[in-house]
Amino acid sequence: MLDAIPAEMITGLISSSLGAFITIQAQAQANYANTVEMSLEQQKGNDDSADKAAGRGDAWSKHVIVGGIMLTGFVGLIIMAFADIPITYLYESPVKEHLLGLFKSGGKIEQVTSDGFLIPPYVSHSVSAIVFFHFGAGAAKVAKG
């Protein structure tokens, strides 16, 4: 079969395939270089924005804000505990499956009322989110160069 195709045709196909492959690779490298250049420009903008944000406030103001938010959450619960104000917390009971999932129970709205100190789960979630955000923002300091 290859005897019927002239050698010039075979070498021409191989050369044109190789030329197309090299051109495609060169274009891919150029696209990658453009992507890297645009990423560096975007990072420069991000660095400028972070530098501006770092200069807006000092560490004490951030500590006061976080402390105020946390105290407000806990002080409100403590006041309600000592003032004998009942706290009602609604939650959805977990769904339990019986007999390989044929029967299900639970999933209803349950109610808990307390006359003492009650910390609902949303308080601990909120406080942990604030604390993690505060320490994460403190750990990610902008490098001055």
Image: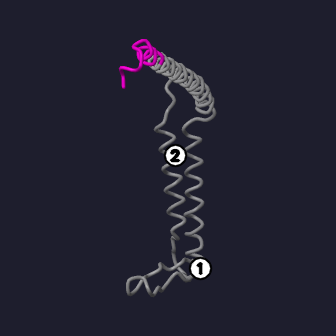
The residue type indicated by label 1 comes to Thr
Magenta residues: mostly which secondary structure?
Answer: helix
The image position of residue 100, as x and y in percent, is 38, 83
- Badge 1, how many Cα within 10 Å: few under 14, some, many 20+? few
Q: Residue at x 49, y 39 (%)?
A: 138
Q: Residue at x 58, y 62 (%)?
A: 73
Quadrant of the rendered image containing residue 1: top left
Q: Nearer the viewer, residue 24 or 28?
A: 24
Q: In the image, which disc is placed on residue 134?
A: 2
Q: Please, which colouring scheme is shown?
A: one colour
Label whose residue precedes the other's in the sequence (1 or 2): 1
Q: Nearer the viewer, residue 6 or 113?
A: 6
Q: Residue at x 53, y 71 (%)?
A: 120
Taking 65 as reference, is 7 left or right?
A: left
Magenta-drawn segment: 1-16
Q: Residue at x 44, y 18 (%)?
A: 18
- Badge 2, how many Cα within 10 Å: few under 14, some, many 20+? some
The image position of residue 47, as x and y in percent, is 57, 27
Taking 16 as reference, is 52 left or right?
A: right
Q: Nearer the viewer, residue 90 or 36?
A: 36
The image position of residue 110, as x and y in percent, is 55, 83
Q: In the image, which disc is placed on residue 88?
A: 1
Residue 26 falls inside the magenta stretch? no
- Vertical arrangement, residue 53 with respect to residue 123, above or below: above
Residue 10 falls inside the magenta stretch? yes
The residue type indicated by label 2 comes to His
Q: CA distance from mark 1 to mark 2?
A: 30 Å
The image position of residue 98, as x and y in percent, is 40, 86
Q: Which residue lies most toward the front here?
A: 4
- Vertical arrangement, residue 33 with respect to residue 76, above or below: above
Q: Name the secondary structure under disc 2.
A: helix
